[in-house]
Image (cartoon, rainbow, N blue to C red):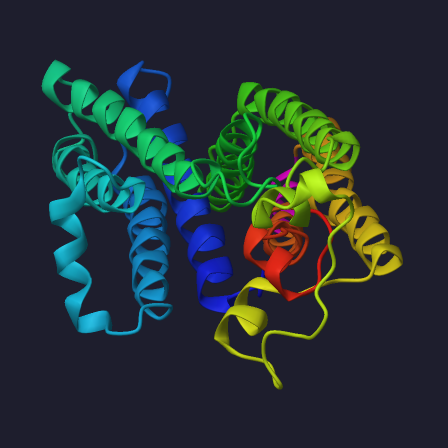
Amino acid sequence: MHPAYSVILFTTTSGAGLGLLAWLGAYAGLGLLAPNWALAVLALGAAFLLVTIGLVFSTFHLGRPARAWRAFGQWRSSWLSREGIVAVATYVPAAFLAYGWGWLESPGAVWRLSGLAAAALALLTVYCTAMIYASLKTIRHWHHPLVAPVYLALALATGGLLLQALLFVHGSALRPLALLLLAVLIVSLMLKRAYWTAVDNARRSYTVEAATGLGKLGRVRPLDPPHTQPNFVMREMGYKVARKHALRLRRAVLLVTFLIPIALTLVTVLLPGRGVGTFAALLAFVSSMAGVALERWLFFAEAEHVSMLYYGAQAA
């Protein structure tokens, strides 16, 4: 599949923003983080900004962005529609959290429940985003049970790293958060490696023989290409990345998305001073965001669409 930069930026930024909101809502809702106006401005402001930027980027891939509102009516059958509805709904409890927990600095039950609701809806939005791709049976790389867990884990990782950096900037770093982040990063690493292993070893069950219905006659190959020059389907669905380049990029993803942030998070645990800790936490977040953007690019570039069986591919 052709990697659309607007979609890569959308899933990367909105994932981090929703992950940040999930962490902050859960911590505030469980009473693990005291109400604070300055922290609310930093953290909730960053979450709202990232989610909103992501939603704006998501419209750039549409042929007619002005008609994006029509997608909200297809919630019965479309994960894209469900994602949009849940994303908008997330703003409601998040706004209550910002008002009560942040502006009023109140630990009241209503505001804490708003935090938990915002956290749940944020994660549900990420899940809906993942299911847009995981529900497509025509793309074997995406139609896999590990796609949604990887999306959720990476959103929690990037959002948690951002929250940790903001807490250091605010001067109220939490050691338990750093330890939880280490666990989330390790689990994310394991999930991503498991996903790559699974898709690499999976049987390529979509074949040109099955697509044409001529498999009973033996091996099938086209006599002539269906078009004399590349068309839209070939450009969008037929993008390929060389295997050796993909392996190099995968190693880069492992390093930048997981290993560097893990090492820097360990620095914040062992050297929790505000100067060193703040620098390490900010660098860990920046590294993870760059790595997730690269991971998303590979997610699209390595995907094989069954439509290419009619354009020379033997299996997908």
Which residue: 35% across, 71% down?
60
Measuring from the top left, give residue 93's x and y in whole percent: 16, 33
Image label count: 0
Boundaries of the magenta span: 273-282
Residue 279 belongs to the span the image colors magenta: yes
Please tell me which residue lies in front, 234 or 126: 234
Q: Please state which of residues 223 and 108 is positioned toward the viewer in this rendering.
A: 223
Q: Quadrant of residue 185?
A: top right
- 43 part of magenta stretch: no
| Residue farthest toward the bottom in the current orientation of the protein | 228
Residue 265 is at least partly visible in this image? yes
| Quarter of the image where the N terminus is located | bottom right
| Camera sees residue 207 | no
- Above or below residue 179? Residue 156 is below
Rendering quarter of residue 241: bottom right
Residue 181 locus on image (x, y percent): 59, 27
* Point 38% across, 68% down: residue: 61
Displayed quadrant of residue 197: top right
Name the side, left or right, on which 53 lies relative to 153: left
Q: Position of residue 252 (x, y in %)?
A: 80, 52
- What residue is shown at x 73% (from left), y 53% (from top)? 220
Report the predominant secondary structure element of the magenta stretch.
Answer: helix
Residue occupying image coordinates x 78% and y 38%:
259
In the shown orientation, is residue 194 left or right of residue 78? right
Residue 65: image location, x then y, percent: 24, 71
